[in-house]
């Protein structure tokens, strides 16, 4: 069978094309490396030098691996297009000052020594004084305290208003129960004296009991802030040669009175303010010692001495007399 010339040419061209493709495949096999397991990798790109990553930041993903999921977290590095953020300045801690070691404990303050007692003049021994010898035209107002303090405020007010000093004979019990009153008396500049501890009748006491009464009152009055030495008054005025000598041996002078106002009897005892003033006036003489009382009458509650005091002072002053404390006995 005769093949047409056109068909021959087409077959020849197809065979030539097949041969060319076969040659090309051989060339590619020779030029390309043998394939490895896994998918073919892309041709490596030229390496570019990257700046070192800051400490603590994640590095680039490993070749052939998938990029890790990005975490939401704060970073000290500035974002693109923002000004760098300066890290906070950390100041070093200030060291605490050293704590001084405790030293030896300080010695407690020593209590002040009690004042030295005024010595008893020899001329005052052996007697229970009823006037101030050689005092001139002065009167000593004295106030006994053994019961309560009902009249004290009026007495201190009257004395202060007229600038008159007084002498206050206190029992130890009264001083212990009224320490603020003792302090008021002393602060006002008045004289404080000893009137025994419990106000007993001294003629019925033994010598040891007398010591207890006098020293007990002395300590109680000192503890309240005043010094009674060396003036003493017997309770009820009861004394004898033995008891006078006993208090003298303890450093005290015995002081009685010139006139008792009897204000302590109260209105229930038939006394009034006028009676008190009249009795002081009747006994007026140089060196007169007037006995008055601070407390109220236990039956009627009156304080006649305190009530009468302003008039008493005015009448004594009008008579041309001044006033002194019993320190005048000691030459003060």
Image: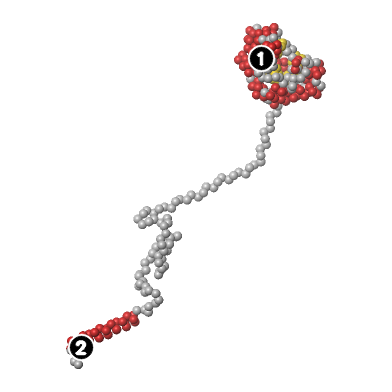
Q: Quadrant of the N terminus?
A: bottom left
Q: Is residue 10 visible?
A: yes
Q: Judge by depth and name the residue closer to the eye, 94 or 77.
A: 77
Task: For label 2, count other residues whose C-alpha is less than 10 Å away and answer few (under 14), some (14-19) or many (20+).
Answer: few
**Residue annotated with mark 1:** 302
Report the Cα–Cα distance between label 2 and label 1: 170 Å
Q: Judge by depth and name the residue closer to the eye, 249 or 27.
A: 27
Q: Is residue 272 above or below residue 30?
A: above
Q: Is residue 309 above or below residue 71?
A: above
Instruction: Tell me which residue sits at (70%, 14%) in the image.
Output: 264
Are the residues at dot 2 and dot 1 in contact (C-beta closer than 8 Å)?
no
Q: Quadrant of the C terminus?
A: top right
Q: Judge by depth and name the residue closer to the eye, 159 or 36.
A: 36
- Residue 208 x, y percent position in the rendering: 80, 24
In the picture provided, is 36 more to the left or to the right than 133?
Answer: left
In the figure, residue 138 lies in which quadrant?
top right
Task: For label 1, count other residues whose C-alpha is less than 10 Å away and answer few (under 14), some (14-19) or many (20+).
Answer: many
- Residue 245 x, y percent position in the rendering: 80, 18
Q: Is residue 116 visible?
A: no
**Residue annotated with mark 2:** 8
In the figure, residue 15 lies in which quadrant?
bottom left
């Amino acid at each position: 069978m005769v093949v047409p010339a056109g068909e021959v040419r087409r077959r020849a061209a197809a065979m030539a094309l097949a041969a060319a493709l076969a040659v090309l495949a051989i060339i590619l096999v020779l030029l390309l490396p043998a394939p490895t397991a896994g998918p073919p990798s892309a041709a490596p790109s030229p390496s570019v030098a990257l700046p070192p990553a800051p400490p603590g930041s994640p590095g680039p993903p490993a070749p052939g691996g998938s990029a890790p999921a990005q975490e939401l977290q704060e970073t000290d590095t500035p974002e693109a297009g923002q000004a760098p953020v300066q890290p906070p300045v950390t100041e070093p801690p200030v060291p605490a000052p050293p704590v001084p070691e405790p030293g030896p404990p300080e010695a407690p303050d020593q209590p002040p020594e009690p004042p030295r007692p005024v010595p008893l003049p020899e001329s005052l021994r052996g007697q229970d004084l009823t006037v101030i010898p050689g005092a001139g035209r002065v009167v000593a107002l004295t106030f006994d305290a053994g019961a309560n303090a009902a009249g004290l405020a009026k007495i201190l007010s009257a004395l202060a208003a007229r600038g008159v000093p007084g002498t206050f004979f206190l029992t130890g019990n009264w001083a212990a129960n009224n320490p603020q009153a003792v302090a008021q008396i002393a602060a006002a500049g008045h004289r404080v004296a000893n009137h025994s501890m419990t106000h007993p009748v001294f003629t019925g006491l033994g010598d040891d009991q007398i010591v207890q009464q006098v020293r007990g009152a002395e300590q109680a009055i000192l503890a309240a802030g005043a010094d009674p030495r060396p003036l003493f008054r017997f309770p009820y005025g009861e004394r004898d040669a033995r008891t006078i000598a006993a208090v003298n041996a303890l450093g005290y002078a015995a002081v009685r009175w010139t006139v008792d106002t009897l204000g302590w009897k109260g209105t229930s005892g038939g006394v009034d303010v006028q009676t008190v003033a009249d009795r002081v006036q009747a006994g007026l003489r140089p060196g007169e010692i007037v006995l008055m009382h601070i407390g109220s009458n236990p039956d009627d509650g009156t304080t006649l001495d305190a009530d009468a005091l302003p008039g008493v002072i005015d009448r004594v002053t009008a008579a041309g007399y001044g006033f002194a404390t019993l320190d005048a006995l000691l030459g003060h």
